[in-house]
Amino acid sequence: MLGFRSINSTETATVEQPGSLQWEIVLCLLLVYLICYFSMWKGIRTSGKVVWFTALFPYFGLISLLIRGITLPGSIEGIKYYLNPDMSKLFEGQVWIDAAAQVFFSLGPGFGVLLAFSSYNKLHNNVYVDALVTSTVNCLTSFLAGFAVFSILGYMSCISGEPIENVASEGPGLVFVVYPQALATMPGSTFWSIAFFLVLITLGLDSSAGILFVEYANYFAASWGLLIAVMFEAITVSWIYGLKRFVANVQCMIGFKPGIFWRFCWAYVSPLLLLGNVIYGFVVHQPLMLHGYSLPSWMNILGWMIAFSSVFCIPLVGFAEIYKAPGATLSTVCLNPYWTSLSFTVQKIVSAAQPKPFNHTTGQAPQSSKEDQCDEETITL
């Protein structure tokens, strides 16, 4: 806790004068990079094994912290505060923007790393069940984590005499200041502190103003960029590539057509909610302030340039593909787009996902199995 306050102190350091390098954080950052590297340096073979620990240990840590937390005085008041939210906040647009950003960071839609890992699945892997299980487990885990956090906050409120809303703080302050401070007052504080920070490790700046840059990048580069990119992704899949074609592709993979609920969400609910979030976010946007520090105007301009740097790649790649396509123009692509036949598209996916070795005896490549055949006769558009 003291290290976080002293190393990341923003009282004297600013964006214009970030201060000197803090070698304690530099070394910690290096350690994080090394852990990530050795978890993935042999590709899916190592990351697949590491994920068993990194996915299961946080549950052990959360449950342990929850059991310890509910035995502390004041924990029940904290849990009551958690289970009685202020429903009037639902009428504030910023709450929905924050909720959307939280869902993206928690579930990971639109992140390239998840797309890369999912490419190792078999073609006929049931992604329908995977999506349901992942979303359900993620929501239940977040709900469980809330009990663990607010039981400790209730305890902090009890020993300090302050209301819970004054004890709780936003952002990394809750993780690195409030929670460790509460753990330090418990019997066996060393064990609980180690368990807590191991949970954080299994779930990465290096100057005095580092925390400013972290939150700055999180606001512009992560939240806004990801929200807009996923919005375009939803619109492109449902309205440009085509909902019927996308549903047919999914049906080819899992063997049945997704229900009307999912098709309605893909076509209307998701794109409209994302579009509404983006528009409202721009309407109510205020210049970013970090820990009471007002960023200079050039930092806000730079932030929006960073936010849109990834988004600009979407139309740029689109125009590049139109330019490379023989005889294609913007009007023909928008008004009468041409897609390859569904059977050809699926067979390309099958060939890429499950390549067949060349038979040197017969001099021919083996035919695809019946399981891999997926043409327009077996699919209802």
Image (cartoon, helix red, strand yellow):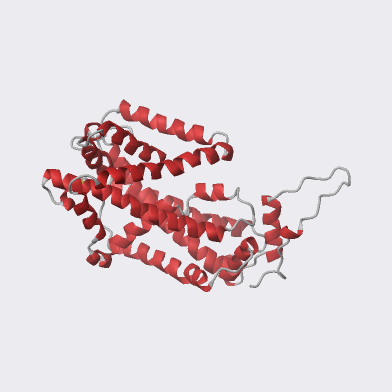
Which residue does the image show at 40% across and 64% down from the upper left?
Answer: 274
In the image, taking residue 245 as reference, residue 17 lies left or right, namely left
Which quadrant, please, contains the C terminus? bottom right
Percent of width and height locating residue 2: 21, 32
Residue farthest to the front, as pictured: 71
Q: Which residue is situated farthest in the left direction here? A: 161
- Residue 320, picture quadrant: bottom right
Q: Nearer the viewer, residue 72 or 245?
A: 72
User: What residue lies at 40% left-to-right and 67% top-to-bottom?
Assistant: 273
Q: Residue at x 58, y 38 (%)?
A: 45
In which image quadrant can residue 68 be found?
A: top left
Residue 190 visible, this angle: yes
Q: Locate the N terminus and report the quarter of the image it occupies.
A: top left
Q: Residue furthest right?
A: 362
Residue displayed at 85% across by 49% down: 364
Horizontal side of 343 relative to 329 (left or right) equals: right
* Residue 305 visible in image: no
Give the percent coordinates (x, y) of residue 210.
29, 37
Judge by depth and name the residue closer to the eye, 69 or 320: 69
- The tally of labels here is 0
- Percent position (x, y) of residue 178? 22, 42
Apparent side of residue 176 relative to residue 263 in the rendered image (left or right): left
| Frontmost residue, 217 versus 301 | 217
Residue 334 lies, in percent from the top left, at 56, 69
Residue nearer the viewer, 244 or 45: 45
